[in-house]
């Protein structure tokens, strides 16, 4: 069962504990509604009353409350979106989702192995044929993008149109990259869709740089507004650094793509220089997560501290693996593309070892999730309630070994024995 991830703000707002019964939540709502109703306060508590109604609508609904206890407000919002889209939220749908994820990971793993075999054994396979598993994996995103574009144009929804365009740009960048491998397109043209895709992604980040995104209203009903300047400044610095490294990487990559080493006497740009911004960005992220994992000890709740430490440790491993892959690709590209024979030339299988490990781990995890979909679904959404219900049943069940008489009485009252049936029959005869 997943642990609680809610902050307790809704329970605090309604002045009840997290184990409150539906009756206690209902009584607390009626009591606070009489106090905070705008008609009784001349409209001064309208905002607090609205929050109270929102909290009661979540905590009074059994499924929404369990989702909130496990995933917080974001989980409730996702559940409501799925219900609005008529997407079934049940164990069967969860099992089907696990199956799709399992097949997607399997296709990506197969694609990675085909590329490794193509490079290491210097086979003459055509690159479009090598990427067949990826074309199959990209079919659902293409259909999704077309559906979003159609729905966005029909309903004049700008967000749907942008998401659809992003997906198509992502697919197009992969297609042009494969065309560049085949020699059908020059590398500057082949890399253009990828740069366009990145530019669209940057446009989505700009609205998050405004300070208003970090202004939060207090959820305890006090109406206070909080703004963390430290978090905002740290977020802005990290975003600017990441985007600066990405822009530098794409700029250097495009400069190297425009060089023609066969015709030019100048030495081609080293791929170590091309990948240096990417390695610097990944290195800083890995270092930050390592430091956070080592010094994170000021969290009030131990379960939150353990969760944050495990997340930071996982991200440190991921970023470190990405640094390893980037270094291996840079070294191999210098030998294979720049024709520098005196450099280190790792095999493709060695270069992508971390990616292989990640894909294999994800595939095994998806297989386990698929085989235990019903239990996992119940543990995520219903585990908390099941434990509480079991505790209540254990506290109220009179079947206790310390009271044999009560146990026998309960058994006689609920399941009549042969003696009672004979006695009832005798009474009917009399």
Image: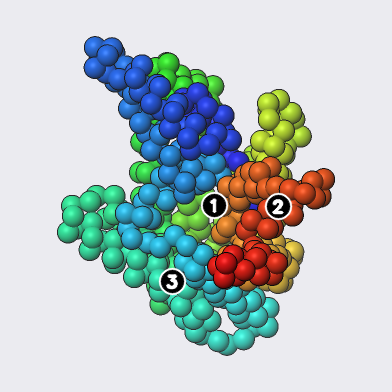
Query: Is 147 in front, or is 239?
Result: 147
Query: Which structural element holds mark 3?
Result: helix
- Label 1 Cα crowd, 10 Å radius (few <14 / some 14-19 / many 20+): many
Q: How far apart are marks 1 and 3 (CA)?
A: 31 Å
Q: Name the residue under label 2.
A: 409
Name the outermost residue toward the bottom: 124
- Label 3 Cα crowd, 10 Å radius (few <14 / some 14-19 / many 20+): some
Query: Is 82 in front, or is 30?
Result: 30
Task: Name the residue rendered at 62%, 86% in the picture.
Answer: 123
Q: Is residue 20 left or right of residue 350?
A: left
Q: Quadrant of residue 154?
A: bottom left
Q: Look at the image and tell me whether residue 373 can be seen.
A: no
Indicate which disc residue 144 carries: none
Query: Is 186 in front, or is 3?
Result: 3
Query: Which structural element holds mark 1?
Result: helix
Tag 2 and tag 3, C-beta contact below 8 Å: no
Q: Mark 3 points at which residue?
A: 138
Tag 1 and tag 3, C-beta contact below 8 Å: no
Q: Earlier in the sequence, mark 1 or mark 3?
A: 3
- Viewer-nearest of labels 2 and 3? 2
Indicate which disc residue 381 carries: 1
Task: Name the residue rendered at 40%, 74% in the picture.
Answer: 139
Q: Distance between the residues labelled 2 and 3?
A: 65 Å
Task: Name the residue rendered at 68%, 58% in the picture.
Answer: 412
Query: Which structural element holds mark 2?
Result: helix
Give how far across and how far down residue 165 sits, in percent.
Answer: 31, 58
């Amino acid at each position: 069962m997943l642990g609680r991830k809610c902050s307790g703000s809704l329970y605090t707002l309604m002045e009840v504990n997290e184990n409150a019964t539906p009756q206690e939540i209902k009584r607390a709502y009626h009591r606070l509604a009489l106090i905070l109703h705008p008609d009784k306060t001349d409209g001064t508590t309208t905002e607090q009353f609205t929050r109270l109604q929102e909290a009661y609508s979540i905590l009074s609904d059994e499924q929404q409350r369990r989702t909130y206890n496990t995933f917080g407000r974001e989980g409730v919002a996702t559940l409501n979106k799925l219900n609005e889209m008529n997407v079934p939220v049940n164990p069967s749908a969860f099992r089907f989702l696990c199956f799709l994820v399992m097949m997607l990971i399997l296709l990506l793993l197969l694609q990675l192995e085909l590329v490794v075999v193509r490079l290491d054994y210097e086979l003459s396979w055509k690159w479009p044929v090598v990427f067949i598993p990826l074309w199959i994996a990209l079919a659902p995103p293409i259909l999704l993008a077309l559906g979003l574009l159609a729905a966005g144009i029909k309903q004049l929804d700008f967000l749907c149109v942008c998401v659809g365009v992003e997906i198509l740009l992502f697919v197009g960048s992969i297609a042009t990259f494969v065309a560049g491998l085949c020699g059908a397109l020059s590398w500057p043209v082949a890399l253009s869709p990828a740069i366009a895709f990145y530019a669209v992604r940057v446009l989505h980040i700009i609205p998050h740089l405004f300070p208003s995104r970090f202004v939060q209203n207090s959820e305890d009903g006090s109406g206070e507004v909080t703004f963390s300047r430290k978090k905002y400044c740290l977020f802005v610095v990290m975003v600017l650094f990441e985007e600066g490294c990405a822009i530098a990487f794409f700029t250097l990559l495009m400069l190297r793509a425009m060089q023609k080493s066969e015709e030019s006497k100048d030495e081609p740009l080293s791929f170590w220089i091309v990948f240096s911004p990417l390695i610097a960005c990944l290195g800083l992220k890995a270092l930050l997560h390592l430091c956070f994992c080592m010094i994170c000890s000021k969290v009030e709740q131990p379960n939150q501290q353990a969760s944050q430490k495990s997340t930071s440790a996982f991200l440190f491993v991921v970023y470190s693996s990405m640094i390893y892959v980037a270094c291996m690709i840079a070294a191999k590209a210098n030998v294979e593309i720049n024709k520098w024979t005196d450099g280190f030339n790792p095999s493709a299988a060695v270069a992508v070892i971390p990616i292989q490990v990640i894909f294999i781990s994800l595939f095994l995890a998806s297989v386990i999730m698929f085989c235990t979909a019903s239990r996992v679904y119940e543990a995520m959404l219903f585990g908390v309630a099941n434990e509480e219900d079991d505790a209540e049943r254990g506290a109220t069940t009179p079947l206790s070994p310390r009271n044999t008489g009560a146990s026998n009485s309960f058994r006689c009252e609920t399941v009549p024995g042969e003696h009672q049936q004979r006695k009832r029959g005798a009474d009917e005869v009399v």
